[in-house]
Image (cartoon, helix red, strand yellow):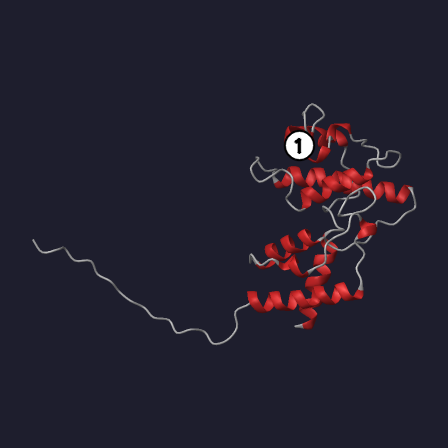
Amino acid sequence: MQRVHFKICTLLILCAVGGSSMNAAEPIPFTKVAPLIKQHCSKCHDSSVVKPKGKLKIDKLNIDLVQGKDGDHWQEVLNRLNFGDMPPKEEPQIGNADREMITGWIVQEMRRAALTKNTITQFRRLTRREYERTMQDLLGVGIEFGRRLPEDGRSKEGFRNDGDALRISPLQYEMYLQIADEALAGAIVTGLVPEVHRYRLEAKKPPV
């Protein structure tokens, strides 16, 4: 059981780092991504919108993650796509193929920027909300798993999902293990199989 807990917590912590699977031999050109972004994101995050959600104008972001200064904003877009925050639930949802194309391009460019700058992508833990949603999706229960976790701090730029602000301490890791232990205990049914009772009902015509 301890090995299961370790695998679950490792999966949860790594979820925020990973992106889409991508074949390095076949880079994704932005020409394929641009129309998808326009189709799925322009309604809420275009410069033509009076009040774009989160003040995010995707059409104004620099697509050059090596020389440009919008890497953090692209990371925000990636996180929102991965955790289902974009598009909002009341809007038409992105198909898996389109989502994979967009997130795949972002991950591809982030890797290229990291290699060019000779830097390592920051390893971070999940935010409270990301942890809660991941556990709910994983176990299929509506328990508020994140309520016992401390509040997430904000980075200098105001983001709650900045890698520098989401380091994981030994105490937090122990808390992840404890919550996973309790979650499994509540989600997995154990004990004797209940006895099955079968009933047969027959419908009869009412008396005339």
Q: Residue furthest right?
A: 118
Q: How many marks?
A: 1
Query: x%, y% of residue 198?
Result: 32, 68
Query: x%, y% of residue 167?
Result: 81, 56
Depth check: give the residue in front, 125 or 31. 125
Q: Is residue 199 above or below residue 59?
A: below
Residue 57 location, quadrant: top right
Q: Which residue is mark 1?
A: 41
Q: Is residue 167 above or below residue 21?
A: below
Q: Residue at x 68, y 68 (%)?
A: 178
Query: x%, y% of residue 13?
Result: 73, 57
Depth check: give the residue in front, 193 or 75. 75
Q: Residue furthest left?
A: 208
Residue 148 location, quadrant: bottom right
Depth check: give the residue in front, 65 or 70. 70
Is residue 10 found left or right of 122 in the rendered image? Answer: left
Q: Residue at x 81, y 46 (%)?
A: 155
Mark 1 burial class by Cα count in 10 Å: few <14, some 14-19, many 20+: some
Query: x%, y% of residue 156?
Result: 83, 44
Q: Residue at x 74, y 41 (%)?
A: 76
Q: Residue at x 65, y 31 (%)?
A: 44
SS at circle 1: helix
Residue 40 location, quadrant: top right
Is residue 44 found left or right of 124 in the rendered image? Answer: left
Q: Residue furthest top?
A: 48
Which amino acid, by three-letter code, is at mark 1? Cys
